[in-house]
Amino acid sequence: MVSTTVSEVGLDAAAPHAHATHDTNTGISNTKLAMWLFLGSECLLFGGLITTYLIYKEPLAGQGPALADIVDIPFTSTSSFVLLMSSLTMVLAVSAIERGDHHRMRTWTAATAILGATFVAGQVYEFTAFYREGLGFTTSRFSSAFYTLTGFHGVHVTVGLIMLMSLFVLSLRGRLPEHKAETVEVVGLYWHFVDVVWILIFAVVYLIP
Amino acid sequence: MTDSTLLGDSPVPTDVLDGAEEDYSRDLKYVYIAIFLAVVTAVEVMTYVAPDFPGWKWGDGVGLVVVLMVLMAVKFWTVAWYFMHLKFDSRVLTAVFYAGLVLAVCVYLAMMTAFRLWWPESHS
Amino acid sequence: MTTLETGPLALEAGEEEAPSNSLGVLGRPKGGYSWRAWFTTVDHKKIGIMYGGTAIFFFIIGGLEALLIRAQLWAPRGTLLTADQYNQVFTMHGTTMIFLVVMPIGAAFANYLMPLQIGARDVAFPRINAFSYWCFLFGGLFLNTSWFLGGGADGGWFNYAPNNGVVFSPSNGIDFWNIGLLIAGIASLTGAVNLIVTVLNLRAPGMTLMKMPIFTWMTLVTQFLLLFAIPVLTSAQFLLLFDRQFDGNFFNVAKGGEPLLWEHLFWIFGHPEVYLMILPAFGLVSDMLPVFCRKPIFGYPFIVFSGIAIGFMGWGVWAHHMFVSGIGPISVTVFALTTMFIAVPTGVKILNWTATMVGGRIRLATPMLFCIGLVTMFTIGGLSGVTHAVAPADTQQTDTYYIVAHFHYVLFGGAFFGFMGGFYFYWPKVFGYLLNETLGKTNFWLMFVGFNLTFGPMHVLGLNGMSRRTYTYDPGYGFELWNKIATIGAFLLAASIALFIFNIFYSKVKAKHLPAPGPDPWDARTIEWMIPSPVPEYNFDPVPTITTLDEFWYRKYGETEDGRLVQIATAEEVAQSAEGEHDVHLPSPSYWPIVTAFGLPIIGYGLLYTWWLSLVGGIITAAGIYGWAFEPPDDPEGAHGHEDHDDHHPDDDGDHTDATDDATPELAEAEGDKEVETVG
């Protein structure tokens, strides 16, 4: 059995109790390892959808608008910025619970959820605007690929919102004590990943001509 | 496991008082990282606002793609390494995540090549 | 039995958790062996048995489909099946055998055996383990209800576009295929995460990675392959789902859809898929051969690293399934080269197995016969595989029976023979009685002869031009004799399976008059053989400390200076006893995995028939997740034993996951995300 002290493993010295080793062979908790494995697999899922999008990004002539015709980069940039900042609030929430500050944890978690919800609202607005400009799901191969990729991402964000709200409620009910900080951390990992996927989508779909 | 349990269920965790500066400096580091990410995003948006800027207007459009890919990778790596704490965690987690990421990149790049996405003429 | 009270999510001494939400309605159920116990079990051993039993059930269905194929092809212009029926039968045969038989048998062995081989109490996430099994069962049943609801899928197990669209396949068959496999895919993905965490985190003290049995290593590689391959299939399946259900344009040629997109995505999954089907059998054989040769496996590190190499290289060869799809000469050349290279690590294994046998004191018990069967039959299949790698030759071979011969030699002669050996070998450990040796040997020879009669001639048929996936053939091509032989062989195979089933019941009856096999009937090497047969619920007590590879063997035997074996202790002396008090914490059973899984096929039916069903299914699944998340972590009425010798505790899922409202039309997308809710 691998047993190491915190200092041996060279962990973030500012958060000694957040990353204590567990009595597992690797020293990593089961849940955290599981989440990272899952995120690794999600790379393959989103990779497939992104590749599909890249192959289909040009609609055939006469089959509805291309992205350049309808996209609103300033709007989407703002949306992306909002999601990016939600990663900051998420990491502050984790930091708060690691030092036992439950009130701040709830504040930052709520902030993350609000920013995430703003992002989703922005997506919904964007999709409705596109739809009104003639881009339905069935309009062209580009439209199907675009809505599927961004839709999948949006659903992942929504699932993340539900997890965040659950954390908030659990904390309110006193069921998220300090030594369960890892729960928040693991939800945070998922949330950051969802943000990272958007970083990819924003560059690859919106910015690259 | 934690210092706070020495005092049982105290309403004010002692480590907030003892390590407050450490914790807040750590939080401040996160804010700095977020500002960095915001700046990188701003540069990305600049490529749209000012497409003729010589920093990315080269290589007949290739320059733009390269710059955007680099900026995207920088943001990706920053979030993963710092916000997701990969830098400070066991190498096993890094290995597991990178395995999926590298595999996805290689396999899908190969697939895109099979679709001749890089060739200037339209693919079949 | 109570749940663990330690581990990263447990309470510190003296700290009270706030009273739990009593919306965790039902208390945790009790364990035991009653009917209800099987529905609520989270015990990896029971789950492994269920995987195996269900797989055998589907094997019989897939086998009947195979017999229909062979009967139809007995003579030219057969009239048993119409062309359309034939398409359904061969599609469902392939789909069933791959997804509902070979993969689940691998899962059965992985679930039952791997935790025992590493000295663990259970897997890392016992409730997710149960959920995986129920997803597999419901997905497989859902797929097969297609027979009663408009016909089975009919596009081949690989379902190429645009044939898989509603224009060319209007019946719901392919939808059942798609949605059924999406549900089963959830099983595979969650299982993969679970088993990887188990192997990495829950090994007994002293068991480093290079002291693990080879089956455990192969399981680890297999689960990584699953983890990364299933999402690729999932993305392809969602594209198909959206095309068929919502008029998407992914494979709509009129709107610029690319049929090759499906092929690439499918085979990027499909090739790692075949490696994950064979690796568990390779692992079983690698652990069995040394027992029946009384020699350690030759070149343990080579077997491990070649397994890992196969895992890596398997990702670089997928387009060898697409040599004639018009991908162009450069792609073809690249993939032909990579395919040739991948023969190397497999060749390394064959060499090592052979070297293990050479110079060993071989006992030809039934499991050993099947091991030798795998080594020889897989070699034949591998050799025909190498001929496929030569792309110009493959241009003639593809879509003929030569390919059918190849993959049946590696899948049946390879994977299934390995599994049969594993069944005979592990039967006493799991069920507490040995299968009859005479019947077993007869079983082997009947299966061996039947198998070769069925698939051997297909090499000839294929090279002579008989086309596969075609419901009949014309007379006068010289196909008649070989087809008749193949059909006879198929019925012999069926007889051999019937004999196996008979052996199970016969041996059980006879066992009443025979002495119990005890913990170690084969004089084996790995630690699962040092616990009682059948395995007690708590597995090990105490958890052994591992000092070497083949730990159990070296507790029984030492070596003299000139390398001769000398017995230090008998198996009975070393093995753990079932007697006495065993105060061990085990994860409590739970209703929620089966409830959560049950909603998924209902969502599927809703996608095909009416949104209201999807709503109902979504509510059931959401209720399941909610109940799961808020389930009390321990059974309040269970005994509170003291913490004993457990070094490693499976993390039973804490109470921190979410409640999901899935009652929206985006259920199709939400389906793929279910794994998110359940893993947390």
Image: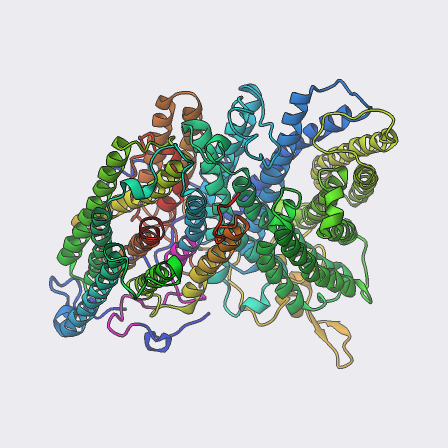
Magenta stretch: helix, strand or loop mostly: loop
Q: Position of residue C467 (x, y in %)?
A: 75, 33
Q: Is residue A24 magenta?
A: yes
Residue B75 appears in the rendering: yes
Q: Quadrant of residue C573?
A: bottom right
Mark count: 0
Instruction: Find the magenta span and give its range.
Output: A12-38
Q: Position of residue C458 (x, y in %)?
A: 80, 38
In the rendered structure, the answer to whether residue A112 lies left or right of residue C37 reads left
Residue C202 appears in the rendering: no
The residue positioned 38% from the left and 39% from the top of the image is A148
Nearer to me, C351 or C41: C351
Nearer to me, C329 or B54: B54
The residue positioned 49% from the left and 40% from the top of the image is C236
Nearer to me, C228 or C424: C228
Q: Position of residue C441 (x, y in %)?
A: 81, 44
Nearer to me, B31 or A54: A54
